[in-house]
Image: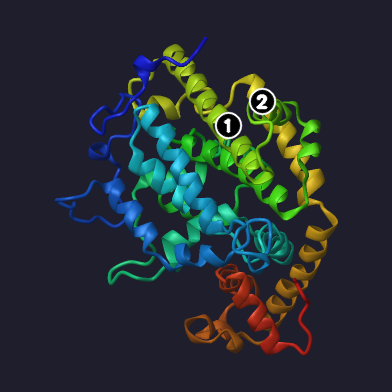
Amino acid sequence: MGLDTNLLGFGAGDRAPWASDPALSRGRFYPEEPSPTRSPFQRDRDRIIHTTAFRRLKHKTQVFVAHEGDHYRTRLTHTIEVAQIARALARALRLDEDLAEAVALVHDFGHTPFGHTGEDVLDRLLSAHGGFDHNAQSLRIVTALEQRYPTFDGLNLTWECLEGLVKHNGPLVGPDGRALDGIVPRPIADYSATHDLQLATFASLEAQVAAIADDIAYNTHDIDDGLRGGLLTLEMLEDVPFLFSLLKAVRKNYPKLEQSRVIHEIMRRQITAMVEDVIETAQSALKEIKPESADEVRGADSTIAKFSSELMRADKEIKAFLYKNMYRHAEVMRVRERAAVIVTDLFAAYRDNPDLMGGQWSSGSRNLDEGALARRVADYLAGMTDNFAIEQHQALFDQTPDLS
């Protein structure tokens, strides 16, 4: 079975019944007058792009620390790549492209400096106060921490965008109300108690394509960065049949091609194969389910935007390959260990002397209980770029670990 080109959407007015309709949006927590020139989801996207949190992604690590070279990806370049793939999937499946793009653009807002290292450290340090989760932190940023508007904190995004941010990887609780993955992060549970995001249902199809776009982007581009950075070699791709098949095809068609172009051609073919597989798989599911609304997508028994069983196996093999050979590479682990020291030291310093944070972060901090102060310190730390965290450590401590 191949792609059904009759079902592909290529016009802005070709929205499918299962797509999110901006005219039927459930609105914003704080009611606002509609824009005469932009849909609610367009306004969400625009607000996201103009935030401080979005700009900070430029100097936050993806895998390599930011100062290792301009050719490696940061959270910002990764986010832009995810948004591009999400829009392509949304257009092909006749969805609302603006909502898909908005969810893609906001999905990494909550990431700390130094990638998952910072998140792991903060989760450990906040273990007695609800832990730390980058997805929940993204929600905190767009509902409270970004302070730009005169009448509300946060961005006052639409319900659909917030739902997509929180549930793009699937429901958080089961029908019985119990958390599906151990515990619902406290910031999400607290927010949903006042603005119900229906944590037991799937998200819109727009959010689902943003989630799978994230998988496609980092699976592909982490391999690209690993090959260009020397942590991986083309010969190592033999361990992953799907990737090795792409390499063989490129070498067969272009036997004298220089390595940099070989790498790019493999990545290009990988993205194309994965995107087309998701489209075909989603089309098949949509034909079977026949949803007549976005709510029927939310009430489906499983994710619609996903890989086929064959590509799902390849996806797992790629993740295992990257974990073993790149994410746990001795050089990466050396940098992670040193970055963890920086985050740990800064947390202790700000917790013990909140005045060091300065400005609004210090204001009233000494009156907070232990848990509230820990959360404020985590909010401050999580918003830092890699470079700013290093600079702050250098200002407060005699010795700062070398991440070069």
Which of the labelled discs sits on residue 249, or is there none? 2
Q: Is mark 1 on a helix, strand or loop?
A: helix
- The image position of residue 395, as x and y in percent, is 67, 89
For the residues labelled 1 and 2, the Cα–Cα distance comes to: 10 Å
Query: Which residue is label 1 attached to?
Result: 269
Q: Reading the chain from its start, which is encountered first: label 1 or label 2?
A: 2
Can residue 369 be seen in the rendering of this structure? Answer: no
Q: Do the residues labelled 1 and 2 touch (CB within 8 Å)?
A: yes
Q: Disc 1 marks which amino acid?
A: Arg
352 with respect to 361 (left or right)? right
Residue at 18% over, 55% down? 33
Q: What element carries label 2?
A: helix
Can residue 325 be seen in the rendering of this structure? Answer: yes
368 over 155 or under it: above or below: below
The total of numbered circles placed on residues is 2
Residue at 82% over, 64% down? 334
Looking at the image, the residue that sits furthest to the left is: 36
Residues 83 and 27: in front is 83
